[in-house]
Image (cartoon, helix red, strand yellow):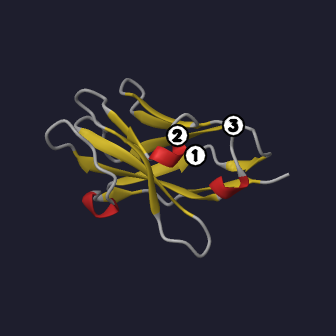
Amino acid sequence: QLQLVESGGGLVQPGGSLRLACAPSGFALDGYAVGWFRQAPGKEREGVSCIAYSDESTYTANSLKGRFTISRDNAKNTVYLQMNSLKPEDTAVYYCAAAVEVQSMCVMVDSWYTIWGQGTQVTVSS
C-alpha cells in the first residue's frame, strides 16, 4: 500500500522553527510532485507549499512566503518543510501528499493528490 509518513512535528514557542519531513512507504518519490497541507481545528484544510519533481519548482502560499520553505532530497527520498518564525496561528495538523507529476509542475489543490500521510501535529504556544 502506498502511503506517506510525516515526522518532525511537535510543540514550539512562538518565533521558533521546525522542520517537517515526508517520506514514502512502499514506493519512491521519483516522478512525484509533493505538497504540504495543514488543517487547524474548526477550519478547512489549506495548501501550504508544493514542489515539483523534474525541475524542483516550488509554490508557497503567499501568506507563508518568507517563513516556510519546501525542499526535496531525492537521494534520501524525502521532502522537507522548513518552518521559521512560527506563530500560534500556524498550529495545525500538517499533511504531506504526493501525485504523479504532470508538465513539470505542482498545484495546491488537495484533490489533485492521490497519496496522503496521516499528518503530524504542530503546536505553537508559549
Q: Are marks 2 and 3 in contact (CB under 8 Å)?
A: no
99 left or right of 9?
left
Q: Are marks 2 and 1 in contact (CB under 8 Å)?
A: yes
The residue beneath circle 3 is 17
- Label 2 vs label 3: CA separation? 13 Å
Where residue 126 sits in the image (x, y, percent)? 86, 51
Q: Quadrant of residue 60?
A: top left
Amino acid found under the numbered disc labelled 1: Ser
Q: Residues within 10 Å of mark 3 (few under 14, many from 20)?
A: some
For image coordinates 77% across by 45% down, the residue present is: 14
Question: Residue 7, labelled with which disc?
Answer: 1
- Label 2 vs label 1: CA separation? 5 Å
Query: Taking 25 as reference, is 91 above or below it?
Result: below
- Label 3 vs label 1: CA separation? 14 Å
Instruction: Name which of mark 3 and mark 1 comes first in the sequence.
Output: 1
Q: Quadrant of residue 24?
A: top left
For image coordinates 55% across by 72% down, the residue present is: 43
Amino acid found under the numbered disc labelled 2: Ala
Name the secondary structure under disc 2: strand
The residue beneath circle 2 is 21
The N terminus is located in which quarter? bottom left
Where residue 114 sits in the image (x, y, percent)? 28, 59
For image coordinates 19% across by 35% down, the residue present is: 104
Residue in front for this viewpoint, 27 or 64: 64
For image coordinates 20% across by 43% down, the residue present is: 101
Instruction: Name which of mark 2 and mark 1 comes first in the sequence.
Output: 1
Name the secondary structure under disc 3: loop
